Amino acid sequence: MANRKKATAARRGALDAIGSAPTAELPAFITPQLATLVDKAPTGDRWLHEIKFDGYRTAARIESGRVQMFTRKGLDWTERFRPIANALAELPVRAAYLDGEIVVVRPDGVSSFADLQEALSKGQARRLSYYVFDLLHVDGRDLTRLPLLQRKRALEMLLGGLPKDGPVHYSEHLVGNGPHVFRHVCEFGLEGIVSKLAQAPYHRGRGRAGQGWLKVKCIQRQEFVVGGWAVSDASGRDLKSLLVGYYKGRELIFAGRVGTGFSVRVERDLLARLQQLQQSGSPFASVPREYSRGATWVEPRMVVAVKFTSWTRDGVLRHPSFDGICEGTAPKSVMIERPLPAKEATR
């Protein structure tokens, strides 16, 4: 009885928070709003700031007790995230559409993409958590035109009916003081922050300048396409490095080699996958001779996440480290991501 009362109060609070949002049918899929990389956090109280999670961007569509979970490209990964879907089925709504991130959180409170990959590969879905940061539809109402703060207020009310120790969590935020928030997030070893205009509606894709979401990173991390590999001559190791790049138009541009961050199990898994993609020639537009010597080339169909410190003047990654395979990412969509000046992105 107590749980039923709590759920009823959560739904009532959420509906009260959305006010007179327009009626609409529940969409089959909503293209997610994306964040633009900038060089510094924006200032002023117009902006709210959330922790940038290191996981899979995931939408949850709920209709009549049935939950579907989609990647940012619209792939249905419900079964991979089954414990999350089961938890969301307990929400006191007839229909809803949520936006958030699937992560694995380490004991120190930091989300880890590598740990997420391990959990998924081993079928350990119960290690997953879902941090929800937006509510786009609820019980026949379209919330995408409402201000972000109003949507988040409704979301917080709605999630209040779920168990605190469950896998679904509300993504908290702070208003204003962007540089201060960013500095403290970096001190805690987190990836960075996402800054959003508190009064803005939801814009599918990246939105126009001054309307979109901005991300500032403590650690550089990007997706790259694998175009080849080198076999290790060291005892106990199978893989020496991955040769990676990004697309510029139709050309795959070489970005360097990644030789750290692999466990023995990951090395063997990567090598087994790459051997299936082997081809005779390089897929890159060009590769410096020192990198191509002894390389085995592959079809550019695998996308990986790489952490690094910076770029060299020659356009090669400094201190890159493998952080996981990015399933569901189209290789041709992988382009270089350089931070824009914050002033340019916020005007």
Image (tube, grey):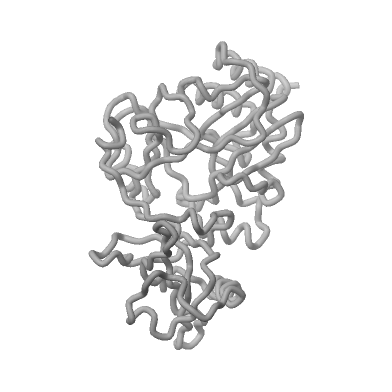
Would you identify the image quadrant in which residue 176 lies? top left
- Name which residue lies at 55% across and 16% down: 17
Judge whether 278 appears above or below 186 on screen: below
Asked whether, in this view, residue 122 is left or right of residue 228, the answer is right
Residue 6, visible in the rendered structure: no
Judge whether 221 appears above or below 14 on screen: below
Q: Position of residue 29 (x, y in %)?
A: 63, 36
Of 158 and 337, nearer the camera is: 337
Residue 138, visible in the rendered structure: yes
Asked whether, in this view, residue 2 is left or right of residue 213, the answer is right
Disc count in the image? 0
Q: Position of residue 43 (x, y in %)?
A: 27, 31
Q: Please, which residue is most extreme toward the top here?
A: 20
Would you identify the image quadrant in which residue 248 lies? bottom left
Q: Please, which residue is most extreme toward the front here?
A: 250
Of 246 and 304, nearer the camera is: 246
Where does the N terminus fall, quadrant-wise? top right
Judge whether 161 appears above or below 23 on screen: below
Judge whether 187 appears above or below 7 on screen: below
- Name which residue lies at 26% across and 42% down: 341
- Name which residue lies at 48% across and 38% down: 205
Q: Position of residue 336 (x, y in %)?
A: 37, 55
Q: Position of residue 330 (x, y in %)?
A: 54, 55
Where does the C terminus fall, quadrant-wise? top left
- Name which residue lies at 56% across and 28% down: 135
